[in-house]
């Protein structure tokens, strides 16, 4: 039987950010964490874009020759 007084906050998964989400209920630390997560995601997207561009450019160069 679960302890009704147990702190289940530590067991909750951190919520992911949604674009346009209401931020008024978040603490400064939570906002900072979201900013860090989004910056990491931007870096990941930029890396994926660079890889796709390189692949596209290589294919374009191959078919032009």
Image: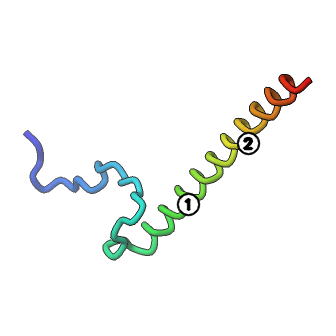
Decide if residue 13 is on the left or right side of residue 63.
Answer: left
The residue most toward the right is 65
Decide if residue 14 is on the left or right side of residue 39.
Answer: left
> Residue 20's x, y, as percent?
39, 66
SS at circle 1? helix
Instruction: Identify which residue is drawn at 62% across, 47% down.
Output: 45
Estimate how packed mark 1 is, as few (under 14), some (14 to 19) or many (20 or more) residues with alpha carbons within 10 Å.
Answer: few
Name the residue tied to disc 2: 50
> Residue 36's x, y, as percent?
55, 60
Q: CA distance from mark 1 to mark 2?
A: 21 Å
Look at the image and tell me in which quarter the N terminus lies: top left
The tag on residue 65 is: none
Name the residue tied to disc 1: 36
Q: Indicate the quadrant where residue 39 lies.
A: bottom right
Instruction: Identify which residue is drawn at 31% across, 73% down.
Output: 25
Look at the image and tell me in which quarter the C terminus lies: top right
User: Do the numbered discs 1 and 2 sit on residues whose CB atoms are within 8 Å?
Assistant: no
> Residue 43's x, y, as percent?
65, 51
Q: Earlier in the sequence, mark 1 or mark 2?
A: 1
SS at circle 2? helix
Decide if residue 15 is on the left or right side of residue 8.
Answer: right
């Amino acid at each position: 039987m679960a302890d009704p007084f147990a702190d289940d906050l530590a067991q909750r998964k951190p919520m992911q950010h949604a674009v346009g989400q209401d931020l008024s209920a978040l603490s400064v630390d939570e906002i900072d964490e979201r900013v860090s997560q989004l910056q990491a995601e931007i870096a990941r997207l930029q890396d994926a874009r660079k890889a796709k561009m390189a692949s596209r450019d290589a294919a374009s160069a191959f078919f032009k020759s």
